[in-house]
Amino acid sequence: VWAQELKFVGTLVWRDVFGMFLLIVVPLFSVLRSTWATWVPTAASAAWSDVAISSDGFKMVGLVNNGVIWTSSDGGATWTEDQGLSQSAQSTCTGVAMSADGSKVFVVSLGGMWRSSDGGENWTQDQALPGQWYDVAMSRDGLLLVAVELDGHMWKSSDGGNTWTKDDNLGSKFWTGVALSADASKVVAAEIYGFIWRSLDAGATWTAHQSLGNKNWARLAMSDDGSRLTTVVQNGNIWTSVDGGDTWTEDQ
């Protein structure tokens, strides 16, 4: 049930919270939170680009396009501007991921990568892998990461971002989103005006969801066990799957 008609251009975060699915959607001018039946605005109007959430639903990190990073520790009731990262660095941030407990946060941007081990209080730039990054996903424990370049490859880390390995299986694409299951064994990735790709073996092999056709896919979200998936079409509708991506339903 949707509270209002929206054309989504942002991100989706899906977490299992006490048996319920908490979905946060970022359209162009607001952040909404839901317990799946109703939607409640939870942040001021801004050009939000991405948001991450802890497994209990209380800790959040949101990115404003060409703006700043905001954090919340009360489920989105109140927000605080993050002062730990420079304004110039924040202005190009494009994607954010968070561990289940909310302590580890990873941000990617058009100018590099930054990570925090204290929920966003302090940040360290990852000097090992410069580039123009668009999205990042993190395993439940924060050790396994997958990051995608805006126009390039997918990269993986198994040590919390200390070292990275390029995934050559899919080649170079215009990536717009990536999502992981809790243990990172299941991965989905989306490309602009292309396919949604799925891996059931941590990225060793991939299958394109050709039945969905080529669309202007934006972000993706995945439940902890990988069975439930959600994605959005830029300036379009939400699509959901309850069988790990075998079949999809467009939300009208």
Image (cartoon, rainbow, N blue to C red):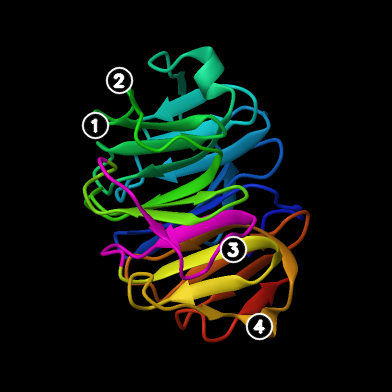
Q: Residues within 10 Å of mark 3 (few under 14, many from 20)?
A: many
Judged from the image, the secondary structure of the residue bearing numbered disc 1 is loop
The amino acid on which the numbered mark 2 sits, given as a three-letter code, is Asn
> Closer to the camera: disc 4 or disc 1?
4
Task: Indicate the quadrant containing the C terminus: top left, top right, bottom left or bottom right.
Answer: bottom right
The amino acid on which the numbered mark 4 sits, given as a three-letter code, is Gln
Q: CA distance from mark 1 to mark 3?
A: 28 Å
Marks 3/2 in contact by CB < 8 Å: the verdict is: no
Residue 246: where, in percent of width, then height? 52, 86
Q: CA distance from mark 4 to mark 1?
A: 39 Å
| Placement of 86 over or under 129, stated as above or below | above
Going by the image, does 57 lie left or right of 151? left
Going by the image, does 7 lie left or right of 53? right
Marks 3/4 in contact by CB < 8 Å: the verdict is: no
Marks 1/2 in contact by CB < 8 Å: the verdict is: yes
Judged from the image, the secondary structure of the residue bearing numbered disc 4 is helix
Q: CA distance from mark 1 to mark 2?
A: 8 Å
The amino acid on which the numbered mark 1 sits, given as a three-letter code, is Ser
Q: Which residue is mark 2?
A: 122
State the extent of the magenta-drawn residues as a range: 162-184
Q: Is residue 174 magenta?
A: yes
Q: Which residue is mark 4?
A: 210
Q: CA distance from mark 3 to mark 2?
A: 30 Å
Q: Identify the residue shown where x is 62% and y is 35%.
A: 48
| Placement of 31 over or under 229, stated as above or below | above
| Placement of 239 over or under 98, stated as above or below | below
Q: Identify the disc placed on residue 176.
A: none
Q: Which residue is mark 3?
A: 190
Q: Which residue is mark 1?
A: 117
Marks 4/1 in contact by CB < 8 Å: the verdict is: no
Earlier sequence position, callout 3 versus callout 4: 3
